[in-house]
Image: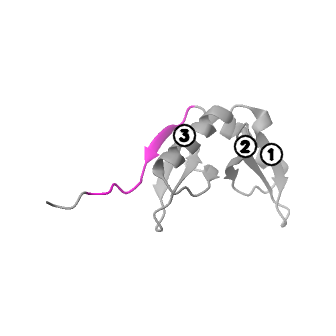
Amino acid sequence: MAAKFNLKQSESGQFMFNLKAGNGEVILTSELYEQKQSAIAGIDSVKANAGDDARYERKTAKNGQAFFVLTATNGEIICTSEMHSSDSAMENGIRSAKENGPVAAIEDSTKELKSPAA
């Protein structure tokens, strides 16, 4: 199975996406967006920035787990990774994001609004 961006809509109506590896594991999770088009622009930003190691910030959570964020050229955070048990697991996540982010297809799981019957 190939990697993909899963574009979804929350119960509150906001939009977000996950970048998933071919095995279904979540690599990156976006913020919530008010508009679907903004979420799609976020995916485009991941595609444009994921291949550049300079766009990754490696971090440590308060509980000691490693994670990373992917930033745009303006320094804004695009996505955040899952928590990793070790620095090496985090580096594997970054490697997967670099390989999959630029080429992953988009799977749109958002609810399509149906126009009311006339």
Q: Is residue 104 magenta?
A: yes
Residue 2 place in picture, x, y as percent: 51, 37
Q: Residues within 10 Å of mark 2 (few under 14, many from 20)?
A: many
Whether the residues at callouts 2 and 1 have beta carbons within 8 Å, the answer is: yes
**Foreground residue, 104 or 2?**
104
Taking the spot 63% from the left edge, 32% from the top edge, the residue there is 48
Residue 78 place in picture, x, y as percent: 66, 47
Q: Residues within 10 Å of mark 1 (few under 14, many from 20)?
A: some
Q: CA distance from mark 3 to mark 2?
A: 20 Å
Q: Is residue 23 above or below residue 14?
A: above
Asked whether residue 22 is in view, the answer is no
Q: Secondary structure at mark 1?
A: strand
Residue 5 place in picture, x, y as percent: 52, 44
Residue that carries the numbered disc 3 in the rendered image: 3
Q: Disc 1 residue type?
A: Glu
Residue 44 place in picture, x, y as percent: 56, 37
Asked whether residue 35 is in view, the answer is yes
Residue that carries the numbered disc 2 in the rendered image: 71
Q: Disc 2 residue type?
A: Thr
Q: Secondary structure at mark 2?
A: strand
Part of the protein shown in magenta = 103-114
Q: Disc 3 residue type?
A: Ala
Classify residue 3 by image quadrant. Answer: top right
Taking the spot 58% from the left edge, 44% from the top edge, the residue there is 42
**Foreground residue, 51 or 44?**
44
Name which of mark 2 and mark 1 comes first in the sequence.
1
Taking the spot 77% from the left edge, 48% from the top edge, the residue there is 89
Dominant secondary structure of the magenta stretch?
loop
Q: CA distance from mark 1 to mark 3?
A: 22 Å
Name which of mark 1 and mark 3 comes first in the sequence.
3
Q: Which mark is residue 57?
A: 1
